[in-house]
Amino acid sequence: MKKRFVAAALLSSVLLSSQLSAGVINATDTHAILNVAKGYGSATLKKDSGGDPFIVGRIEGTKYGILFYGCENGTNCDDIQFAASWSGKRVSLEKINEWNRNKRYGKAYLDKDGDPRVEMAVNLDYGVTEENFDDTFDWWTKVMKEFKESVLND
C-alpha cells in the first residue's frame, strides 16, 4: 500500500510539474516572445552583429525593439529589454528627469546624439506565465504611450 501511495504521489508531482511548465515563457524562447509581440502589432525576429536575437516591432505606429541579454552564442538568453527612441526629437534633460522621478516603469535618458530613449528591462530567468508576459507587454505599451504624451508632445 505504501509503495502505491509513493508512486501515485510521484506521478502527481510529475504531472503537476509538467502542467506548471506548460505556458511558461523565458528569454530562451524567442519565438514565444515574438508571438506575443505580434499580438500587439507587427514584429520581426532578427540577429544582431554578435549573433544575439532581437525583435523589431511597431505598436500603434511607434517603432520599438526587444533586446536579448545574457545569451550564450546567440541562444539561452536570460532576460530582455524593451527599448524605443525618437531620432531628431529635442527633449530637455529636465523633462527626462521628471519622467524618471515620477514613473515606476520605463527608464528614460538622452542618448549620445541627444535623442530621447525609454527602456524597460524584464527578468525572465526561470520563466513567467504567458499571462504575466502578456501583461508585461501591456505595460510596455502604456510606457511608450505615456512617454510620447508627457515627454515628447510638450
Image (cartoon, rainbow, N blue to C red):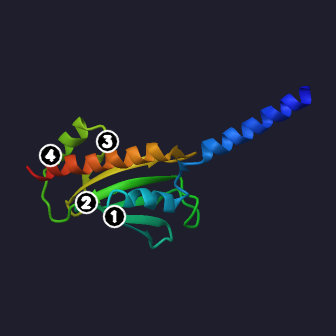
Residue contact between numbered discs 1 and 2, judged by CB atoms under 8 Å: no
Residue 132 lies left or right of residue 110; in this view the side is: right
Question: Gap in Å between the C-alphas at discs 1 and 2?
Answer: 13 Å
Label 1 SS: strand
- Residue at the location (39% across, 58% down)? 37
Q: If you read the primary sequence from the N terminus, does the residue marked by circle 3 or circle 2 appear first?
A: 2
Residue contact between numbered discs 3 and 1, judged by CB atoms under 8 Å: no
Residue placed under numbered mark 4 in the picture: 150
Question: Gap in Å between the C-alphas at discs 2 and 4?
Answer: 15 Å
Q: If you read the primary sequence from the N terminus, does the residue marked by circle 1 or circle 4 appear first?
A: 1
Any mark on residue 85, and which?
Answer: 2
Question: Gap in Å between the C-alphas at discs 3 and 1?
Answer: 19 Å
Instruction: Judge the density around disc 2: few (<14), some (14-19), many (≥20) Cα neighbours within 10 Å.
Output: many
Q: Nearer the viewer, residue 53 or 58?
A: 58
Residue 27 lies left or right of residue 145; in this view the side is: right
Question: Gap in Å between the C-alphas at discs 3 and 2?
Answer: 16 Å
Label 4 sits on what residue type? Ser
Q: Which of 56 and 72 is in front in this view?
A: 56
Q: If you read the primary sequence from the N terminus, does the residue marked by circle 1 or circle 2 appear first?
A: 1
Question: Gap in Å between the C-alphas at discs 1 and 4?
Answer: 22 Å
* Residue 124, percent from left and from top: 50, 48
Residue placed under numbered mark 1 in the picture: 57
